[in-house]
Image: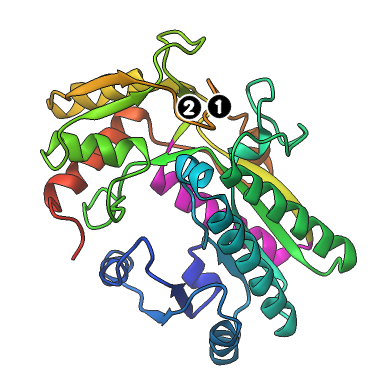
């Protein structure tokens, strides 16, 4: 498998640093040995994006620029619709203006709603239980309409399941600003003493132990899926959705137990109320990604926990 830097010689990062810090890019350069052109710009800033495109003439775009917390989206739906959907439309218009018609979109398994598990790409989408998931569904539909209007576009929709873990170097990992919305960074901050207690949202679901079941995937496996998707869109036209997951469901208590086992850290947690918008269980059928992209997840849940804790202990106060 070719690295993106071999396919596209010059790589650029565009970020408004809403939930990240510029220092992360220094660490990416250290890991990869490659330099990045850096732009601080919001996806909704048309003039700023046009400057980026004019200066870099990109062959393809990987679109990660979206707010992504299920619970927060239920409290702040207008912020999610405005940022995720309006921002995406601006990006697609700028891409069209500069004749850059190849994109990998960071979508989500939440587009499936309450379908039978495992989720397959042939299932209907759109019956979604939260605003975050609806923004992902709407953007997929927008891209579908873009392709119908102009079939020279090449579009990969990567439907992530639950990315966790960190790079094994400990240089980069999940380091959200403020209180984490996702399970694993919350666990690691409780383990290192930055947060007093973990609340498990719901213990009365119809699952094996009453807690939600999800398909967790190592972030490095996820990154490799993007390399495969970029290689595909550069060589083809069309629009395709791919599930990016392990194909195995783990409960919240499974994750807690795996973290305690692999790190030796005892976690202080309680079972709380359900969180708005959460489904009881889902996991992937990733056969299509295996077959068409040549991609398959390699890392198990123990590796995800080990790498998370390695990152946390090497960066107790986050990335500065």
Residue at 56 percent across and 50 percent down: it is 77
Residues rendered magenta in the picture: 217-237
Left or right, residue 102 beside residue 54: right
Q: Which residue is mark 1?
A: 283
User: How many numbered circles are shown?
Assistant: 2
Give x and y (percent) for residue 174.
31, 50
**Residue 163 falls in image quadrant:** top left
Judge by depth and name the residue closer to the eye, 227 or 312: 312
Q: CA distance from mark 2 to mark 1?
A: 6 Å
Q: Which mark is residue 214?
A: 2
The answer to whether residue 266 is above or below residue 73 is above
Relative height, residue 228 to residue 235 (above, below): above
Residue 206 is one of the magenta-drawn residues: no
Name the residue at 53% across, 42% down: 74
Asked whether disc 2 touches disc 1, contact meaning CB atoms under 8 Å apart, the reply is: yes
Please tell me whether mark 1 sits on a helix, a strand or a loop: loop
């Amino acid at each position: 498998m070719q690295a993106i830097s071999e396919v596209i010689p010059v790589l650029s990062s565009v970020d408004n640093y809403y939930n990240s810090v510029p220092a992360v890019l220094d660490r990416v350069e250290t890991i990869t040995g490659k330099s990045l052109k850096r732009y601080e710009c919001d996806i909704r800033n048309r003039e700023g994006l046009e400057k980026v495109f004019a200066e870099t003439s990109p062959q393809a775009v990987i679109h990660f620029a979206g707010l992504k917390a299920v619970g927060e989206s239920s409290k702040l739906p207008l912020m999610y619709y405005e940022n995720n959907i309006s921002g995406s439309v601006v990006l697609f218009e700028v891409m069209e203006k500069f004749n850059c018609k190849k994109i990998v979109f960071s979508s989500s398994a939440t587009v499936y709603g309450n379908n039978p598990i495992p989720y397959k790409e042939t299932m209907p989408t759109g019956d979604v239980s939260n605003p975050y998931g609806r923004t992902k569904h709407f953007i997929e539909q927008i891209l579908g309409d873009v392709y119908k209007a102009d079939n020279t576009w090449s579009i990969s929709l990567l439907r992530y399941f639950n990315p966790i873990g960190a790079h094994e170097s400990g240089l980069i990992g999940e380091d959200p600003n403020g209180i984490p919305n996702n399970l694993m960074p919350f666990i690691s901050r409780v383990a290192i003493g930055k947060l007093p207690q973990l609340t498990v949202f719901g213990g009365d679901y119809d699952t094996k132990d009453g807690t939600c079941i999800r398909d967790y995937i190592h972030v490095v496996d996820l990154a490799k899926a993007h390399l495969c998707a970029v290689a595909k869109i550069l060589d083809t036209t069309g629009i395709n959705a791919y599930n990016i997951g392990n194909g195995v469901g783990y409960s919240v208590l499974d994750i807690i137990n795996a973290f305690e086992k692999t790190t030796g850290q005892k976690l202080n947690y309680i079972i709380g109320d359900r969180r708005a918008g959460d489904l009881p269980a889902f996991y992937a059928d990733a056969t299509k990604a295996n077959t068409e992209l040549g991609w398959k997840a390699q890392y198990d849940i123990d590796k995800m926990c080990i790498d998370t804790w390695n990152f946390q202990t090497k960066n107790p106060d986050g990335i500065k």
